[in-house]
Image: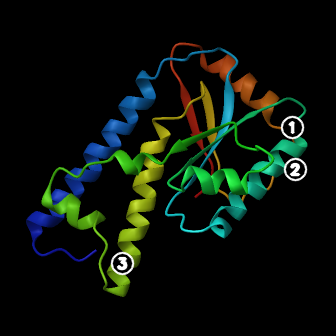
Amino acid sequence: FAFDDEASCDNEMSFFSRLVQQVLWLLLTKVVSSEDEVGVCYTRNMVREASELRNVLLSASSLRRVSSSKIRICLFTDAPPKLVAEVDREKVFDVVLADSLSSFTPRTRAEKMLLHPTTDGVQRERRLKVRSRLGRIRNLGKAPFALTLFIDDDTFFCEDIADLLRDLLRTTGTTTGTTTTGTT
């Protein structure tokens, strides 16, 4: 990223440091609502058309096919609900939630600049990537399950993971939620 001055750079680092602290706090203080509630979550943000939901739908469908039990599947997205319903005709997703970036309000000028679109090609791509990652990070703290595996939308499931997740939940205890992320 290019910064106007050293103070802007320091503000950006401070922003990310505060963000990481907030996410960790959310993860450590989340109360479990059900001992056996496990699930998989996806984040697909910056969706403009139905084709951009294709991979996440294929991945979630592969999980449904191999699951012996009904594992819960969640999608965080900024896609309009009508578009999601049109694409997800088989109701693969049990829960569809708004991408957490939509509720984020920048507090400083530096944060606003970082998230504000620009016409400069390189800066635009970098800012879009930051927006996407910020949404994903914020979604970690809003997972609707006691134990959540966040998965990239290019993951194809070949085996059932429900028992593995339930065993992991039993070994982690029942007073705090646990969130695990897949590869990025």
In percent of width and height, residue 74 lies at: 64, 40
The amino acid pointed to by label 1 is Ser
Distance from label 2 to label 1 (Cα)? Answer: 9 Å
Residue 3 falls in image quadrant: bottom left
Q: Disc 2 or 1, which lies upstream in sequence?
A: 1
Closer to us: mark 2 or mark 3? 3
Q: What residue is rendered at 54% in x and 68% in y?
A: 48
State how many labels appear: 3
Secondary structure at badge 1 equals loop
Pointer 3 local density, CA inside 10 Å: few below 14, some 14–19, many at least 20: some
Q: Specify the quadrant of the image occupied by residue 67.
A: top right
Q: Which residue is drawn at 59% across and 39% down?
A: 180
Task: Give the residue pinned by disc 1.
Answer: 67
Specify the amino acid type for callout 3.
Arg
Residue 79's place in the image compared with 71, above or below, is below
Report, in whole angstroms, how far the alpha carbon at label 2 lies from the one at label 3. Answer: 37 Å
SS assignment at label 3: helix
Q: Which mark is residue 124?
A: 3
Q: Say which residue label 2 marks.
A: 158
Is tag 1's residue or tag 3's residue first in the polypeptide sequence? Answer: 1
Residue 66: image location, x then y, percent: 89, 43
Q: In the picture shown, does residue 109 fall above or below 39?
A: below
Q: Are the residues at dot 2 and dot 1 in contact (C-beta closer than 8 Å)? A: no
Mark 1 nearby-residue class (10 Å; few <14, some 14–19, many ≥20): some
